[in-house]
Amino acid sequence: MEIKWTVKAKQDYDSILDYIFSDFSIKEVEKFVNLTEDTLFLISKNPLMFPKAKTKNVRKCVLVKQVNIYYRVNKNQIEVLTFWDNRRNPKGLKH
């Protein structure tokens, strides 16, 4: 299935990459990018492999212990809603 990112997902992802780059190394950024690409590939092949989140029709993938991917499966595509940094206040999570 095709994967489409929301504007929010792109912004969150970029923010996480900026954080990793500023506090770690380019090697860690590359590892995170590769893990994200591999995980999204798996999701595209089997969109129901991760559990449902609390919100209807939204699924939650634990990318790393600090970051979750929230996505929605539509008829012909997967919509990546957000990359959530688990260190943030969960009350701010809206997907």
Image (cartoon, rainbow, N blue to C red):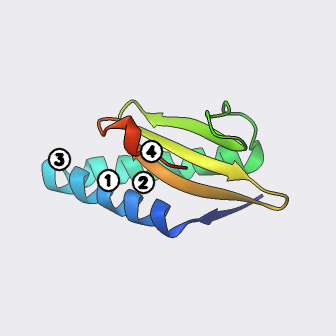
Q: Which residue is mark 3?
A: 24
Please tell me which of labels 4 and 2 falls first in the chain. 2
Name the amino acid type tagged 1.
Answer: Ile
Q: Which residue is mark 2?
A: 33
Q: Position of residue 76 (x, y in %)?
A: 83, 62
Name the amino acid type tagged 4.
Answer: Leu
Disc 1 versus disc 3: distance between alpha carbons? 12 Å
Query: Closest to the observer: 49 or 27?
Result: 49
Report the residue at 46% width, 63% height from top. Answer: 8
Asked if residue 85 can be seen in this view, the reply is no
Q: Which residue is mark 1?
A: 16
Residue 58 appears left or right of 83: right
Q: Which residue is mark 4?
A: 93
**Mark 1 surroundings: few (<14), some (14-19) or many (≥20) residues within 10 A:** some
Disc 4 versus disc 1: distance between alpha carbons? 16 Å
Callout 3 touching callout 4 (CB < 8 Å): no
- Disc 4 secondary structure class: loop
Residue 27 appears left or right of 64: left
Callout 4 touching callout 1 (CB < 8 Å): no
Looking at the rendered image, the disc whose residue lies closer to the viewer, 1 or 3, is 1
